[in-house]
Image (cartoon, rainbow, N blue to C red):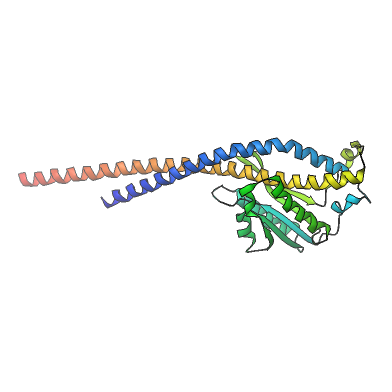
């Protein structure tokens, strides 16, 4: 019977875990809807603004806005790694951390690479291995454009004053609840349109190119960072919902297997007791 008690305890434990994962799945599903609507609504605007920015940057040679398109020799790199504050979301965070490590060890080997961690998971992992100059985990408590703009302004200042020669952003792009795509985007310097795309772009500047540059480029860079964080936020809830759905299914399957094992063990114990009683009765009759 000790074996049966152990199986009953395991069934109770798995059932309790299943209730937790099921609740987390429902919470993530509710949050995902709002986050998905937000990134879906802003993505066309952000993409078009980035397209305009790249087209404009192709004609910024010698212009006042060239400070954001200044391609210097890359010696110092700043990487903005966007993760979540919590785990239990599958490979969502590990993919970002793996890509960050790859940048340091392969892409920018021999260069000075520092990090800005957006999310506690990035700070916890990268802080033990590399130099993390800033951590912004509280941004998810109030994810607004104005709050993200402050981070973007700090990044732009670090580039224009020569502290860093290149700034990269790593985040999960939201595709659907089950699929997130790891993206590495160059934040600064601005990547201009080249080739046929550049030749086909013809802009008329009003009131003047200098004023357009002064307003459009900073706004576009802030929007690019905001879109990356929004994408990551939606991806997090999608990844967690999927992970908790799989965990609930696995817990259900394990619970059913344990119940079957328990019933077989209980049946075997009852059968043994009957055999012992029959054997004892036969012994008395003889």
Q: Quadrant of residue 32?
A: top right
Residue, x 81% and y 48% (percent of image)? 218
Please tell me which residue lies in front, 87 or 250.
87
Residue 132, position as x, y percentages in the image: 68, 61
- Can you give x and y, in whole percent of width and height, for residue 257 in the image? 38, 42
**Extreme residue in the right direction:** 62
How many numbered badges does the structure rendering display? 0
- Nearer the observer, 100 or 141: 141
Residue 176 appears anywhere in the view: no
Figure check: 132 above or below 205: below
The answer to whether 146 appears left or right of 195 in the picture is left
Which residue is rendered at x = 63% and y = 47% of the image? 142
- Whether residue 19 is visible here, answered yes or no, is yes
Question: Residue, x 60% and y 55% (percent of image)?
Answer: 121
Left or right: 282 with respect to 119? left
Question: Residue, x 79% and y 54% (percent of image)?
Answer: 156
Q: Position of residue 134 (x, y in %)?
A: 69, 59
Where's residue 200, x and y in %? 90, 36
The C terminus appears in which quarter of the rendering? top left
Is 107 or 134 nearer to us in this picture? 134
């Amino acid at each position: 019977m000790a074996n049966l008690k152990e199986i009953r305890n395991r069934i109770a434990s798995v059932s309790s875990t299943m209730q937790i994962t099921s609740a987390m799945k429902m919470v993530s599903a509710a949050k995902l809807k709002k986050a998905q609507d937000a990134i879906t609504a802003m993505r066309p605007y952000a993409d078009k603004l980035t397209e305009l920015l790249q087209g404009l940057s192709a004609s910024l040679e010698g212009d006042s806005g060239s400070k954001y398109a200044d391609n210097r020799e890359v010696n110092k790199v700043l990487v903005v790694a966007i993760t979540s504050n919590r785990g239990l979301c599958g490979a969502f965070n590990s993919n970002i951390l793996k890509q960050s490590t790859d940048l340091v060890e392969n892409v920018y080997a021999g260069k000075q690479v520092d990090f800005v961690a957006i999310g506690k998971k990035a700070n916890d992992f990268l802080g033990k291995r590399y130099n993390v100059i800033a951590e912004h985990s509280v941004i998810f408590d109030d994810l607004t454009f104005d709050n993200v703009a402050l981070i973007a302004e700090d990044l732009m200042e670090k580039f224009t004053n020569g502290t860093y020669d290149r700034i990269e952003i790593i985040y999960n792009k939201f595709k659907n609840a089950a699929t997130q795509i790891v993206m590495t985007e160059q934040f600064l310097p601005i990547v201009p349109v080249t080739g046929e795309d550049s030749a086909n772009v013809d802009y008329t500047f009003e009131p003047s190119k200098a004023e357009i540059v002064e307003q459009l480029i900073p706004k576009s860079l802030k929007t690019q960072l905001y879109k990356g964080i929004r994408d990551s936020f939606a991806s997090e809830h999608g990844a967690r919902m999927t992970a908790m759905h799989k965990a609930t299914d696995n817990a259900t399957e394990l619970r059913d297997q344990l119940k079957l094992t328990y019933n077989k063990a209980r049946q075997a114990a009852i059968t043994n007791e009957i055999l012992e009683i029959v054997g004892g009765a036969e012994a008395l009759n003889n």
